[in-house]
Structure formats: C-alpha cells, structure tokens
Amino acid sequence: MESTKKTLFSCAMKGEWGKVIDMYKQDATLHNARITRSGQTALHIAVSDGKEDVVKQMVDAMSQNKEAFRTSNNRNNTALHLAAYMGNARMCHIIASVERTLVDDRNVDGETPLFLAALYGRKHAFLCLHYIRNPLTTAPPYYGNCRRNNGDTILHCAINGDFFHLAFRIVHLYKELANWVNEEGSSPLHLLASKPSAFRSGSRLGRMETLIYHCIQVEKLKVENPAYEHQKCTRAVEDSDSRDCPDNCKILWDVSQLIKKVITAVVRKPARADAENPGAGGSHVDRAQANPLFPVNYKTCCDLIRFFYLVLLIILGKGSEELGKLYRKKENHTWSVQIVEQLLGHASMYEYEDDGRNPEEDERYPKQWSDADGIPRVSIKPSNTENNGNDEQNPKRRTTETPILVAAKNGVMEIIEKIVELFPVAINDMNEDKKNIVLLAVEFRQPYVYEFLLKKAIYKESLFHQMDKDGNSALHLAATLREHKPWLIPGEALQMQWELKWYKFVNKPMPPDFFVRYNNKNETPDVVFTNTHKDLTKTASEWLNKTSESCSVVAALIATVAFATAATVPGGFIPETGEPILEDRREFQLFAISSLMALGFSITALVMFLSILTSRFQEQDFNKDLPRKLMIGLTSLFVSIASMLVSFCAGHFFVLKDTLHHLALPLYVVTCLPVTLFVLAQFPLYLDLLWAIFKHVPQRSYSPTAGLQL
C-alpha cells in the first residue's frame, strides 16, 4: 500500500493525471489515501492545481464511494473546502453534487466549504454551494453551516473582508443572520459601524479625487429572483469555471450601457408630466421638478461625464492604480449603505428598548441549541440585565455597545442617520460607562456627529446634559486628551491648537453654565484640560522652539545677504550726479525692488521667530497668538527667500547678458535649486498652518499616518 501511495504521489506531482485516474478506477482504497505530509489526497492536489476535467473524472471514479469525499487533510479540510477556498464554482458543483451534505463538513476551525467561500469572497462558489444545499423549495435555508467555532457567521466574514456584493446576497438568502451575534456579542451591524472607511463620511478625498469620485458610476446591488439566479449559476458552471471577468471587460460593459443610456436620453423626447400625477412624467422632468437648480438634461450631462471617465479608464487599462482604488472605494461606499438598510429592515426585534447587550441564546452551548434540526438560532432582543463582562456561561463574551454608539465613536453618519430615522428611541442608548451618543462623539472627536446632534433642538436637554459614571459632562470629555491623536494635522503645536478649537467648539453653542461644572473628582473642565494636556503643551513648546530656531537662522542669513546686496549697485554710479548708471534698465529696477523686499521681509521673519522663542507658551497662546506669529514668520521668510533669489538673478543678468544670454534662465534655475528645496520642505507646514488657523471645526482623521489633503 505504501508503495502504491508513493507511486500515486509521484504521478500527481508530475502532473500525470491520466495514470492517477486509472489508479483511482482500479483501486478504491486509494480514494481515502493521504499521500502528502499535510494529509492531502490526490483529489486535494487536483483541486489545488485547478484541474477541472481531472477532478470530474476522479469524482466519477469515486461515485460509488461517497464517504471518500469526506477524507480530509490535517486541518480537516476536504477537497470541497479547497475548491470553495479557490472560488472555483465548477469544481464545487462537481464535488458537492455527489452528496449535498458535503457542504456541511467542518474543518478544525468549524468552517464549512460554504463558510470558506464567504470568508474569501468567492461569490460564484458560494451561490453554487448554497443552491446545492438549499434547493428551490419553500423550506427555509439551512443555517447549520453558516457559523464557525468563534461564533462568526458567513455575514460577519463577508463584511469583515469588504465583500459587500456577497454580503448583500447573504442578507437576502439568510435573513436571520442579520440578528446573529458572535461570541463577543457583535452583530453584522456592529462590524459595519466599526468600519468608517467603508462609508463616504469616513473617507477623506482630495479635491481632484472628489471630482472624479462624483463622476464614477456605480450600479446599486439588486435582489435577483432565486430561480433565475439558480439557473444562471447552473448555466455558468456548465459553461466555465464562473470566475469574474477582467476589469477591462467590466468597464467595456459599463461603457456600452452608458452609451445606450445617453443615446436613449438624446433621441427620446422627455415625457410630459401629468397634471394630476406629477410623478408620472419622465425621469429628467422628475429630477428638474424635484430640484429646480438642476436643468432638465442634468442626468444626461452626468452620464456624459461618466462616459468620458470610463473611456479614460479603458485607455489606462483601469489603470491607473489610483483610479482603480477610487472606483472600488465608490463601490464600497454605495453598497455598504445598501447593506445597512437591509440589516435594519430585517432586524425586526432590534427595537432599541434597552442597550442591545446579551442575546437571549448563544448557540455556543448545547442546551441553547435547537434540537429539531440542529440549526443554532440566536435572538438579539435587548435585555434589561446589566453585564459586567463576567458571564459564567461564556467568559469570552464582553459587553457590546449598540451599533449607533459604535457608529458615533467612528463617525459613520450613514448608520447614525438610518438608525435615528427607523428607531428614534435609539438616540438614548448608553454604554456600560453611561456614555450616550453625545459623550462618545465628543470623546472620540467626531465633529460631524456632534453637529448633526446640535441641529436636533429636541435633543439638547435630554442628551447634552448627560454625564458618564464619573460625572464627566461633554465639556469634561472635550477637555480630556487621550492617547490617540485623531486630528488630520501634523506637529504638536498644531495638535494643541486643534485641541483648543475642539474644546471651544463643544462649549460655544451652549448657553453659559449649561454643562455641569464639577465631576466626581471635583474638577472643572478647565482643570481637566490643563492636567491632561501638560505633556502635549511641553512637546508643542519644544516643537515651536526648534522650528523657530532653524527658521530664524535662515532669516538672519537672508537679512545679512539682503543688506549687503541692497548696498551694492550693479554698474556703479555716475560721478557727476551720483545716480546709478543702469537706473533706466528694467533689470536694475527689479533688482532694487527685490533686494529691498528681501531685507524687509527677512527682518520681519526674524522678529516673529524671536518673539516665539521668548513666549511664555501658555495653553491659550496656542489658540491664536503663537500660530499667527508662526504663520507671519513663515510667510515673511518665504517672500524674503523668493525676493533674494530674484534680486540675485536680476543683478547677475548684467554679467551674462552679452555671452550666455539664452542660457541665463536655465543656469539661474539650477543655481537656486538648493534654496528652493528648503522652501519646499517647509511649505507643507505652511499649508497645514493656514488650514488650522482658518478651519473653525477640526477635521477628523481615520488614518494615523494620513497627511493633509486639499
């Protein structure tokens, strides 16, 4: 037997699949033979190698030995597990069609082939396995293979992996999963609320990116008829391996659809709206009536812009990596909102009567499983029982905040608006620290959430007066500096400035003495701000000192050079009158003006930086005084550097005008390059400083390494 297994292994490794198939037909004991160190059979190897026809012949040879299909490797993965992992729908169909319960086999992590297809976003393989396990009948789908050992469901995994097109289908095929939680108590809506980058409100785009973003056309996901979808999957499996088409093919299809829409819009006359039923008119008329700011052909213009954008993508081969990322980002933003709507629509028991903790049942424990069909069923109806995270039945379960609180912490406005619209009482949710949506938005520096709540006057008395378990009001939390630095700005001094802006932003719209003055430690918000910002104040002072010292050295050097230059007159003077000889030349006038400007602005910059170095560096100084001085100093320094370069080039032009007249400009550019590099190195700081001074509300960042985008 060992000799035969070695021969089988050798043939499989060499790709001699004809011999492997013959051996499978002649000896049924080889169907279960594990021939690799990882415990894989020849069928495992054929699946991993993507040999669809070989797999089909091997499966036919094993058709009378169905138990052999359950032979697994060292991680208990069957051949169907590997086919699902690879996303090969045809191989999944070939193997699972022999025995549909193969879809329910679990590996060491409790993952079924259906689960692995969802885990890695293999949509075609997932749908193939789903319809094999759940034929088109009136019976509910089988939920027993939708969860792994840690409690994550296929919907959790699809959302975690940003496979929103698959998650959308899962919500419709397995509606109950919208209410299932994992062992940590997190539902699919919790996961979406903790992924701000999956929504437009949590993404920061530059101006050009924003323009292109709005021109991208992304079709919304649609619910397909199960019978039609099953037929389409079957036909696709029979024709090919059902893998996704290349990106350019998809773009070509989008372009063809856009061309069709544009031609239809141009040729077809707009429908005339019915006087009794204004909504019966054409789509363009409806758009114009709904918003008079847009012309009747607004949609046609948008389609044209999208058309040219897609043509650009074709030319670049979707090409451009940044354009491809932007396209996928727009897809995620569009589809994630659709999934939120579907999850909230299916969450019939999610009424936010309490805090959303503690599911009534947990399928992790046998006494809570449904013995009728082996399907774990979990309810997420809120419970009044407080949980301190010491659940005797499941010590891993931690107290979970409701999705609206998680969304408030992460600034996901799309989820907050939808929940408030469908479940208005959710606005009163609190976590175990007695923090509501206002306190969490302030604590985690979410200006958009705070502004949204400010617009709701009805919430002012009920929400903004709330205090946490330590007696901290929203103003106390705004004054508290934590480890994370959420602001989209570099430099400790600018961080300190934006902390002050946030503190004033939270306090400004409220009447005097609106917030509670003292917390349980008998501290006022001002005292909390001073105590928690000591280290930041110190580092901000050191940062300003270093910046001012380096810039003041440059300013002093420029002032010295500018003074010497201003006192030197190219060409000399006329002895009789004392007037400059080259006074009437334009180059001389440019030299005189620029040298004087270099001297004046360099001295101004030097004075500003010296005033920063002699400052007391109090907390309030970082709000306006020090940033303004730094901005004036940097502005003067940049102007003086530019003026010095202009004066040098203008004065030196008289030396080269007769010999290297045409090469003067390139020579001056190369000569000024080292000095220009210093300006370019400091210029981002200048832009950040301008942004921080003129921006009244700090802008939240979700990436610790994100830079300023204009």
Image (cartoon, rainbow, N blue to C red):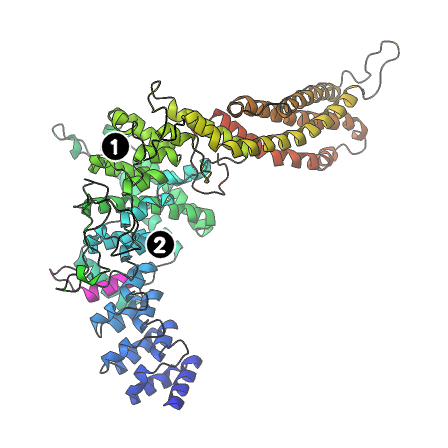
236, above or below 21, in the image: above
Q: Identify the amino acid type marked 1.
A: Arg
Residue 614 place in picture, x, y as percent: 64, 23
Please tell me the numbered disc located at residue 462.
Answer: none
Disc 1 versus disc 2: distance between alpha carbons? 36 Å
The quadrant of the rendering that contains the N terminus is bottom left
* Residue that extends furthest to the right in the rendered view of this protein: 575
Determine the image quadrant of residue 246.
Answer: bottom left
Q: Determine the residue positioned at 35% across, 18% down.
A: 512
126 drawn magenta:
yes
Q: Is residue 197 left or right of residue 226?
A: right
Marks 1/2 in contact by CB < 8 Å: the verdict is no
Residue 127 place in picture, x, y as percent: 25, 61
Residue 644 place in picture, x, y as percent: 71, 26
Mark 2, residue position: 161
Which comes before the other along the chain, label 1 or label 2?
2
583, above or below 138, in the image: above
Mark 1, residue position: 287
* Residue that extends furthest to the front in the rendered view of this protein: 521
Q: Is residue 564 left or right of residue 57?
A: right
Q: Determine the residue positioned at 42% across, 48% down.
A: 325
Q: Which residues are magenta?
A: 125-140
Determine the image quadrant of residue 93.
Answer: bottom left
134 drawn magenta:
yes
